[in-house]
Amino acid sequence: MSDYRSPAPSARILPPGFESSPMQQQQGTPTDSDESLNQALDWLLLLENADDDCRARFAEWLAASPANAEAFGRVQQCWQSPTLVSAAARLQQRRQPAPKRSRRIRGALAIAASLLLVVGITLQSDLLLRLRADHVTAVGQRQSLDLADGSHVLLNTGSAFSSQIDANQRVTQLLRGEAYFDVAKDSSRPFQVTAGPVLISVRGTAFSVRYLDDAAEVSVERGEIEVHARGNDTRIYLASGDSIRIGPDGVGKRIHGAAASQLAWVHGRLIFDDRPLHEVLAELRRYYPGWIINRNAELNDLRITGNYRLSEPADIMRSLAQVTSAQLQEYPSLLILN
């Protein structure tokens, strides 16, 4: 019987030759689930060339906690994910020949191992978002969800979402992106949404949350909600038609009447009201599965007002080219405004 003991939650078993990154040391203390995922990533690499002793130590780690077994299963599922495969291909193109290296670190395994170690450092990467989330949408995709309590959630493009709903609680988390919530009424269990700097609590209402670039925007379609700014313990109450932005620069002003345009995506539309072109293009990039480039800086501050269907971002770009008297060059997965 091996005398190996499963590492403490704060410890990691790295493959030989690798040490903890300074980026890891600067981050805050990870949660138990995040740490289990990090350890699972390491074990996935170690098992590629494992001896009997290594496999025995892995078996002990796997049996030490249900969270370990769950994390390893999720990591295995993501091993062949499109995100991982495409990133590995990009790394392969950059690699230089290294004839003195051993076979153990050659080829696709070394590429994937390098990628996984980078992912292990950055918990907010696409791979770990997929591991932590119950639902993830791709660029340009929307997904409709019916939760166990009868609430309805619509995920917008590029979003990651998780939920835990049982007889005692209704807790959800928007890890990235944008979501619309139509919450079933329940006076005994408040419905909670965490999105970066905000914690939202409601009992039955409809609203949207947008969480991008460390800032959260909340817009209420109907009813009333309580928004808790987690950084400074501020509580804000929003009513139908209200919206507010909370981010690294603090709590913004409550705005009334702008929620309709901010909720337009729920109905498949994008509405811009006197917005500079550079902001319009930044929003379109969220929906277009490719590159949108503006090569004419003089166009950036042109004001745009319009109501568009978001299902065809290329059509919106053609309309913008006409409005701004610019030329649009179209290539596969690439739109260039001149």
Image (cartoon, rainbow, N blue to C red):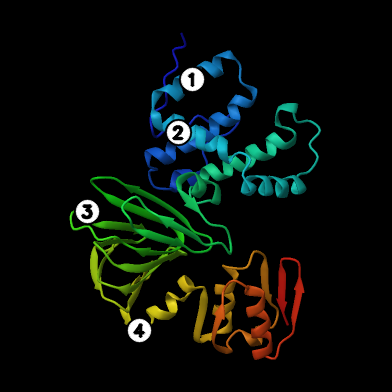
Disc number lying in front (2 or 3):
3
Q: Are marks 2 and 4 in contact (CB under 8 Å)?
A: no
Sequence-earlier tag: 1 or 2: 1
Gap in Å between the C-alphas at discs 4 and 3? 29 Å
Give the vertical position of 45 relative to 229 (above or below): above
Q: Nearer the viewer, residue 165 or 17?
A: 165
Mark-to-mark CA distance, 2 and 3:
28 Å
Residue type marked 3: Arg
The residue wearing badge 4 is: 257
Crowding around mark 3 (Cα neighbors within 10 Å: few <14, some 14 to 19, many 20+) is some
Q: Quadrant of residue 36?
A: top left
> For the residues carrying marks 1 and 3, which lies nearer the camera in this image?
3
Q: Amino acid at mark 1?
A: Ala
Label 2, on which residue?
Answer: 70
Disc on the earlier residue, 1 or 4: 1
Dot 2 crowding, Cα within 10 Å, few <14, some 14–19, many 20+: some
Q: Is residue 16 visible?
A: no
Residue beneath label 3, please? Answer: 189
Q: Residues within 10 Å of mark 1 (few under 14, many from 20)?
A: few
The first of marks 2 and 3 along the sequence is 2
Disc number lying in front (1 or 4): 4
Say which residue label 1 marks: 59
Residue at image point 58% right, 68% down: 287
Q: CA distance from mark 1 to mark 3?
A: 40 Å
Q: Position of residue 224 (x, y in %)?
A: 25, 71
- Residue 136 at x, y = what percent? 51, 53
Q: Are marks 1 and 4 in contact (CB under 8 Å)?
A: no
C-alpha distance separating marks 1 and 2? 14 Å
Q: Foreground residue, 87 or 79?
A: 79
